[in-house]
Image: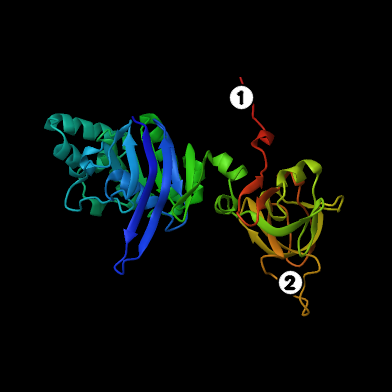
Amino acid sequence: MANLQLNDVTKTFTEDDGNEIVAVDDLSLTIEDGEFLVLVGPSGCGKSTTLRMVAGLETVTDGTISLEDRVIDDRQPADRDIAMVFQSYALYPHMTVRQNMSFGLEESTTMPDDEIRDHVESTAEMMGIEQLLDRTPGELSGGQQQRVALGRAIVRNPSVFLMDEPLSNLDAKLRSQMRTELQRIQEDLGVTTMYVTHDQTEAMTMGDRIAILNGGKLQQVATPLEAYHEPANRFVASFIGEPSMNFFETELQGDRLVHDHFEYPLSENVRSNLGDTTHVTLGIRPEDIELVNTAEDDHDFRTVVDVVEPVGSGNNIYLAFEGTESDSGELETDDSRTFVATIGGLRQVEAGQPAIARIPEEAVHLFDSETGRALRNRSLDDAELVEPQV
């Protein structure tokens, strides 16, 4: 086990025409001993490049990478005590599972053959693939290949695991199952792990902490719940969560946020978070919007149901503010007029019917419209703790 540090790491690629592309920009990050940290972000944000620099497959343009306070930038990949699981699994097609899992130990250690065999077999048993040891990768399903690739990394007993979207080639059901298995295995082994994914569901369900990247820059490092409920900026708020947070561009006028289609009054406590900022983005998670029977206060808004999207356990209800119909009587559906609420799956709502949407003040997020910086978030202090039963 080990502590992994990235200190002001930058990676720049030079194109054929001489233009430079900054793939990773001044990234500082510490993965604690035994921690499962997930790097997440959209395609091209620099997460896989970061992983490859840690592995030694890409050189660092500037900054340093250290393992237990030992700089490893100048070490070959084989000398870094790091094992990597690739998206493509990267198994040798002409070798059996046993040979694939043994190969790294045979090449990088002086371990006797019988000890290697015992180590491979015990690891295969832990992974549930002991019956596959004499098969080749071509005879395995995607899930089995994934287990073999992971077993090949585990058998080396590295200080750090690096995983580059290892579940992306699996179907949805198997991907969900393997998320749970990966968490269990990592907890059992206690190995420091850096995991890359573009899937925010994987990030939220697997990571002890998640690091969100965008455009090569680190946006926030936080626990999954902190990133969800206390995002550092609008990008994090929009990227984490499905359906995404609703956003409304407003202007502060006195104690009210004024939007093209509504006004939202603020209490003095919430208003005090804004300081001198006047252009404010109001955010609200779909599940925090309530559909109520009667309008009772200034945070209740008359809307019309545009689209109903059933998802089994719930319904995503796309709403338009009342009075935003076009001359033809159809709803205008640009981003400023419509938003989404999530309600229980057994509540029946139909397109075209009126609805009163309540946007509770305690659940709103406020961002500086110019910088995207969070000015006010829903507090995790409001979370309800479930007391253990004895």
Asked whether, in this view, residue 146 is left or right of residue 317, the answer is left
Could you tell me residue 154's position as x and y percent?
Answer: 29, 36
Quarter assignment of residue 29: top left
- Pointer 1: what residue? 388
Q: Find the distance from the CA under tag 1 to the CA under tag 2.
A: 49 Å
Q: Residue 263: x and y, percent?
A: 80, 57
Q: Which residue is mark 2?
A: 331
Circle 1: is it few (<14), some (14-19), or many (20+) Cα within 10 Å? few
- Which one is in front, 271 or 301? 271
**Circle nearer the viewer, 1 or 2:** 2
Dividing the image into 4 quarters, which one contains the C terminus?
top right
Residue that appears at 14% across and 40% down: 107
Disc 2 is placed on an element classified as loop
Q: Which residue, as the protein is rendered here, is positioned at the far front?
A: 276
Q: Amino acid at mark 2?
A: Leu
Query: Dot 2, how many residues are within 10 Å of its Cα: few (below 14), some (14-19), or many (20+)?
Result: many
Say which residue appears at 26% left-offset and 41% top-offset: 152
In the image, is 373 to the left or to the right of 222?
Answer: right
Q: Is residue 332 left or right of residue 99?
A: right
The kind of secondary structure element at disc 1 is: loop
Q: How many marks?
A: 2
Residue 213 percent across, percent down from the top left: 47, 50
- Residue type beneath disc 1: Pro
Residue 363 can be seen in this image: yes
Q: Is residue 143 left or right of residue 227?
A: left
Task: Name the residue: 24% across, 42% down.
Answer: 74
Contact check, label 1 and label 2, Cβ < 8 Å:
no
Q: Is residue 85 above or below residue 122?
A: below
Mark with earlier residue (1, 2): 2
Residue drawn at x 49%, y 38% is: 209
